[in-house]
Amino acid sequence: MRHKELWRMVAVVVAAAAWGLVAAQWTPRGPLTNAQALWSVAISAVVGLAAGWWSRSRWAMLAAPAAFVVALELTRIGVRGPSVDLPHLSPFGIVALLAGRGVHGVLSILPLGLGAACGAGVTRRGHRGSLIRRIGTGVLTAALLAATVAVSVPARTAPTPGPNGVAELTSVGVGPYRLGMMIRGTDVEAPVLLFIPGAPGGTEIGSMRQQLAALERRFVVVTLDRRGGGSSYPALEPTRTLTLDREVADTLAVTDHLRDRFHQDRIYLLGHSGGSIVSVLAVQRHPEKYHAYIGTGQAVALRASDRMFYDDILVWAGETGNDGLARQLTAQGPPPYADVYLYEPIMTYAPRAYDYDHEPNAKGATGFGLDVPEYTLLQKIHMMNGVLDAWSALYPRMQHVDLRRDVPQLEVPVYFVQGGHEMRGLATVFDQWYERLRAPHKQLDVFETAGHRAMFEQPDRFVAVMDRVLAGR
């Protein structure tokens, strides 16, 4: 390579590396929103086009993406979570790799390489590439255009009937980040119900739309995406601030926003699973902001529950002849774990170990209800990574909590909806807390044929419970 050509290639590497550095600061986990995705495609294509044109060499197709990747990975080396950590050879790890680096590759590296190919082609008009190369470039370009169109489709929610309704996907500023939420109701003057979903990084907007739309005729229903989940995935950084106290503060901040917006002194708070711990602590700290608390799939003490899950799944593995799972669990020992991947066998096999007849229930027994327009394509793709990244940051920091010790009393009426097939690790610890808990009014409804997701499995019955909550009985 001649001296002038060498310097041209150095310039290509520097430009691509600079873009990689900027991308790592701007989108450390890759493009997470439609706007980020479209800007990433556009900037990468422009940088690639300039690199190919300036170098006048097809080598830019390799040099520019390589420089981008090296700069990106080195710059975000302090970012933590399965979506950016070294690949892990497990089902969860493969999902994290494809939804993380895979999507980033399609939206940043692919347009960079294609741009370099086009830029170099412009300077080599007398040189026709091979038919195979031209076909390959055309196919990749068509795929990139299709992906760009797909990720540009915004999330949307249908209007509610009546002139006084509300139906919107919005967000609220909480400190340095914004939390996404869905707000729906047929009457803006109805009582406000704030729902805090379960797993860290999880989202239940789809399930609420599919299973519990009937609540919208009784409440202004606000479904929050906690940090790391759904539309709040971009709020995950910095993960060092993702703590239980911060989650409680987020809930209280959203509560105050809703009280101000809808001119209500108090609202209702509904928490499911892991979100129920956050909700209980919010009610404990500021009972004056809530009419009542409703808990379902109630979590109480994660350490105690997880050890029961571990024991039960280990026994199930022995009874069903799953020797590999038994060896894996025995080797890693009981929880808690610092590594999210050590929870993978528990999360994977708990539905089998605690299986029951789902026939009497709606489809809400499993899943997040992703087939709704309230999610963008990127939010659907990143759903699992949101759980893994947020779980990795938050779950180890929640191991100290035990509501049996920390919350002996609540100063608002409390209502609980539990499944008759709730997992033993949750049911046993909840029963112990419920027996001791003091509150102005305390009520427990058990849906005999439901499990951990009772509110979604038997939505009609859950709505009937909420009618009693509204009536104060």
Image (spheres, rainbow, N blue to C red):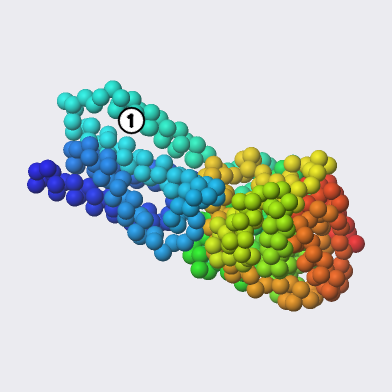
Q: Residue at x 40, y 44 (%)?
A: 105
**Total of numbered circles in the picture?**
1
On screen, residue 268 versus residue 335, left or right, reads right
Q: Residue furthest right?
A: 473
Q: Residue at x 51, y 65 (%)?
A: 239
On screen, residue 132 versus residue 455, left or right, reads left
Residue 428 at x, y percent in the picture: 80, 64
Q: Is residue 391 visible?
A: no
Residue 209 at x, y percent in the picture: 70, 45
Comparing 347 with 275, the one in front is 347
Residue at disc 1, secondary structure: helix
Residue 90 at x, y percent in the picture: 53, 50
Q: Residue at x 18, y 33 (%)?
A: 123
Q: Residue furthest top?
A: 131
Q: Which residue is mark 1?
A: 137
Comparing 416 with 289, the one in front is 416
In the picture, the quarter occupied by the N terminus is top left
Q: Can you tell which quarter of the image residue 254 is in?
A: bottom right
On screen, residue 94 versus residue 323, left or right, reads left
Give neighbour class at mark 1: few <14, some 14-19, many 20+ (Cα, 10 Å). Answer: some
Q: Residue furthest left?
A: 3
Q: Is residue 155 visible?
A: yes
In the picture, the quarter occupied by the C terminus is bottom right
Identity, as a three-letter code, of the amino acid under mark 1:
Thr
Q: Residue at x 74, y 45 (%)?
A: 364
On screen, residue 110 versus residue 365, left or right, reads left
| Picture layout, residue 439 above or below residue 351 | below
Comparing 330 with 200, the one in front is 330
